[in-house]
Amino acid sequence: MSPRPVPPQRAWRSPLRGPWLTSVLASVLLVGLLVLVVTGLLSYAAYDPRLGGSNDQTPQAGLLASWIAFDWPTSPSWLYRVNQGLHVTLGLALVPVVLAKLWSVAPKLFAWPPVKSPAHALERLSILLLVGSILFLMLTGAMNAQYDYAFGFSFYTGHFYAAWVFIAAFATHVFLKLPTMVRSLRSRPFGAEMRTSTADTVAEPVDPHGLVSPDPAPATMSRRGALAVVGGSSLAVLAMSVGQTIDPLRRTALLAPRGQVTGDGPNDFPVNTTF
């Protein structure tokens, strides 16, 4: 018989982990991911102008697509640019927050035993779908923004169906965890936590959810520092991406696949591919 895995609470000893930090990150994602869902569905509607024939790339979508099919307005002309720019730029900027959130709940992801009851099995399944779908969407979305289609399937179709898996799992997760998030945010004043130094940073009280280590290591960073790293990373990605949408900031768009300068004269428009 294989030995029992090391309990995750002892393998993950950071004193920063706990319901409060997880809930702060979750509150950011709650707002940001909702914006991504709305702009993504609007982008789908704009991408499929219902011209008939082979134009529809998801003909089997049924109710998943029929209710968001509408005529995209022709004016203002910049409307789609704003929607798509917000979707792509925000999606990239949220990557550090998503990774930090996964780090904060790592003990739960590796909890043992993995399933304790039928209800727990359903919750774990929803988390598996949530984590898998968001990582898939962000990875393929970033690759699509760079015109890298190494994944070998239609980005449009894959992104669409994965988005609905994410929406279902996300809605389930919010329904189950929103009360816990609210209670956790109220448990520690945000301002006081932001004034706490590394030397004064201690673990939260052991919680029933298993996020807090029963044997925490000494703090090497405050929660303020951790949030600053995550927030700074998101702002850095934002600064290197937003120039793709806002022309005056084009030279700051270091992540732009076409470079920072489009050219001069009548041919100063971007070209995706040449044959």
Image (cartoon, rainbow, N blue to C red):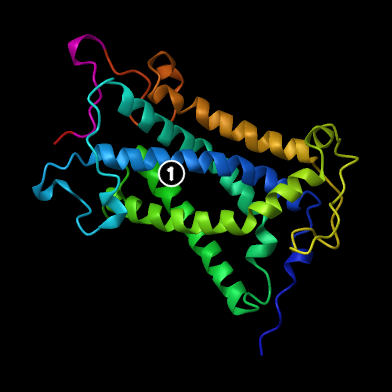
Q: What residue span does the magenta drawing correspond to?
A: 264-273
Q: Is residue 96 magenta?
A: no
Q: Position of residue 19 (x, y in %)?
A: 74, 52
User: Which residue lies at the image location 61% right of the left edge and 73% below the top edge?
Assistant: 120
- Which one is nearer the viewer's eye here, 101 or 67? 67
SS type, badge 1:
helix
User: Which residue lies at the image location 58% right of the left edge and 78% below the top edge?
Assistant: 118
Q: Amino acid at mark 1?
A: Val
Reading the image, the residue beneath label 1 is: 37
Kindly tell me whether residue 146 is visible in this rendering: no
Give the quadrant of residue 145.
Answer: top left
Kindly tell me whether residue 242 is visible in this rendering: yes
Q: Residues within 10 Å of mark 1 (few under 14, many from 20)?
A: some
Image position of 80 with respect to 125: above or below: above
Image position of 206 with respect to 267: above or below: below
User: Which residue lies at the image location 61% right of the left edge and 59% below the top edge?
Assistant: 176
Q: Position of residue 92 (x, y in %)?
A: 48, 38
- Quadrant location, the N terminus: bottom right
